Amino acid sequence: MTSPARLAVLISGSGTNLQALLEACADPAYGATVVAVGADRENIAGLDIAAAAGVPTFVHRVKDYAARADWDAAVTASVASFEPDLVISAGFLKILGEGFLSRFDGRYINTHNSLLPSFAGMHGPGDAFEAGVKLAGATLFFCDAGVDTGPIIAQVAVPVLDDDTVETLTERIKVAERRQLVDSVGVMVRDGWTVTGRKVTLGRKSA
């Protein structure tokens, strides 16, 4: 029997994506288990969720390190100690450096609340709303050295309704984003993936 894939999850806040992953991992058929949760701040709800699930946690605050590279090295070492198959940024609000990206190249994924490459950055739903687009959404992608620029794994569209506000649109995107994250990670750990240039294919190709 194949061992479950090992997931390390990085968070900065409420942990709603983490909670969804933990619930999915409770089913052995999902094919994965969360082995560690890391954060860049203390006293956040996501850490409580991890503790309640019995998952080991660690916290590295940027301000506790003399240089950003030292913080990056500490996060890298902590994540590596759990030997993850995938590292998932689930609402993690810090950009990790070259040391981390090199160590987990092709295994570090992030979810963003817009249809990339449109509306990258911190305000995806608001920027999409102000632009008057008819379709917003969410993107799951492999992290690289840019900001929301890595190869795209999956995308889900969320219609912008006539009576939407930024707040209502943001909440609907969060629901779709969470479902996409759980579904895509499940496929990745069970069936594998390939990356050719910028094209990501989920599932092992037949011989």
Image (cartoon, rainbow, N blue to C red):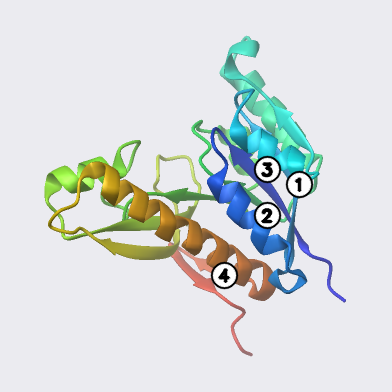
Point 66% across, 59% down: residue:
23
Which residue in the protein does label 4 denote?
A: 194
Residue type pointed to by label 1: Ala
Q: Is residue 3 above or below residue 20?
A: below
Q: Position of residue 167 (x, y in %)?
A: 28, 42
Numbered label tally: 4
Which residue in the protein does label 3 denote?
A: 103
Q: Is residue 117 above or below residue 124?
A: below
Real-space CA distance between mark 2 and mark 4, rounded to the nearest whole angstrom? 25 Å
> Which quarter of the rendered picture does the N terminus lie within?
bottom right
Which residue in the protein does label 2 denote?
A: 22
First reached walking from the N terminus: tag 2 or tag 1: 2
Which residue in the protein does label 1 denote?
A: 53
Kindly indicate whether the residue at mark 1 contacts the one at mark 2 (C-beta within 8 angstroms): yes
Q: Is residue 207 visible?
A: yes
First reached walking from the N terminus: tag 2 or tag 4: 2
- Eye-nearest disc, 2 or 4: 2
Badge 3 density bin: few <14, some 14–19, many ≥20, Cα 10 Å: some
Of 7 and 170, the residue lying toward us = 170
Q: Is residue 167 above or below residue 94?
A: below
Residue type pointed to by label 4: Thr
Q: Secondary structure at mark 2?
A: helix
Of 103 and 202, the residue lying toward us = 202
